[in-house]
Image (cartoon, rainbow, N blue to C red):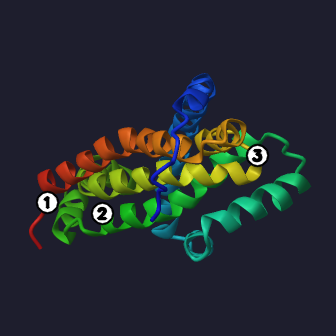
Amino acid sequence: MFLAVDYRWNWAGVWRYRGQFALGWLTTLGLSLAAMVVSVAAGFLLMLGCRGRWMPVRLICAGMVELVRGSPLLVQLLIGYYIIAEALHAGFPMLVGIVLLGSFHAAYLAEIFRGAVESIGASQLEAARAVGFDRMQTYRFVIVPQAMRRALPGTTGQLVSLLKDSSLLSVIGIEELVQKVRVMNAASYAPLEGYLPLAAAYLIVTLPLARLARGLERRFAYET
């Protein structure tokens, strides 16, 4: 059986490190929030680049999206921190982790944004040109307001994945929640008592976000 009958729970040993657990949880939330801002901004810029007028810009942005989406986040963290960041003498793990995590999910958000923009009917673009809107005004007043509503459900789901992927930042030395739990388990010799609160801490945040994503999907559902 998975749990022995005579297993002795050691919640007292884990309780002694509750401060470190709370610090790790707050660190994870802060890193995730900062990476979300980076991912949304970079994803929007990548989407604009993929739809740009100049071929070199389109090729570069599309290549970046495919390159990032075609390799695991763990590999990108290791290469980005231990090779690229070391070469640039960027010795700030948290900053590097936020940029790498945000860039990874920005590639997926760029495709979500692109799909939302391309779902806008051609008749609306023609109407915008008919009233004299230039390209910037068309994006501002016609495309972006509608595309934002259509992209919200997919964006929310992607941000939930970003929060869970923040657990991988421990591989570059960031003491977020997972790393704090590992240290706590090693000191208290209570692995189960440490990992159960770890799962609960993620569920406290991800379940409301997942519920929000489902609600947005129902609210902004469009007929094909």
> Does residue 155 appear left or right of residue 75 in this picture?
left
Q: CA distance from mark 3 to mark 1?
A: 42 Å
Q: Please, what is the three-letter code of the amino acid marked with disc 2?
A: Ala
Q: Please, what is the three-letter code of the amino acid marked with disc 1?
A: Ala
Quarter occupied by the C terminus: bottom left
Which one is earlier in the sequence, the residue at label 3 or at label 2? 2
Q: Which residue is mark 2?
A: 116
> Which label sits on residue 221?
1
Q: Which residue is mark 3?
A: 173
In front: label 2 or label 1: 1
Q: Position of residue 151 (x, y in %)?
A: 30, 56
In front: label 3 or label 1: 3
Residue 37 appears in the picture as rendered: no
Asked if marks 2 and 1 touch (Cβ < 8 Å), the reply is: no
Task: Classify 10 Å Cα crowding around label 1: few (below 14), some (14-19), many (20 and above).
Answer: few
Residue placed most toward the observer, 159 or 150: 159
Kindly identify the residue that appears in the image at 47 percent across and 62 percent down: 2
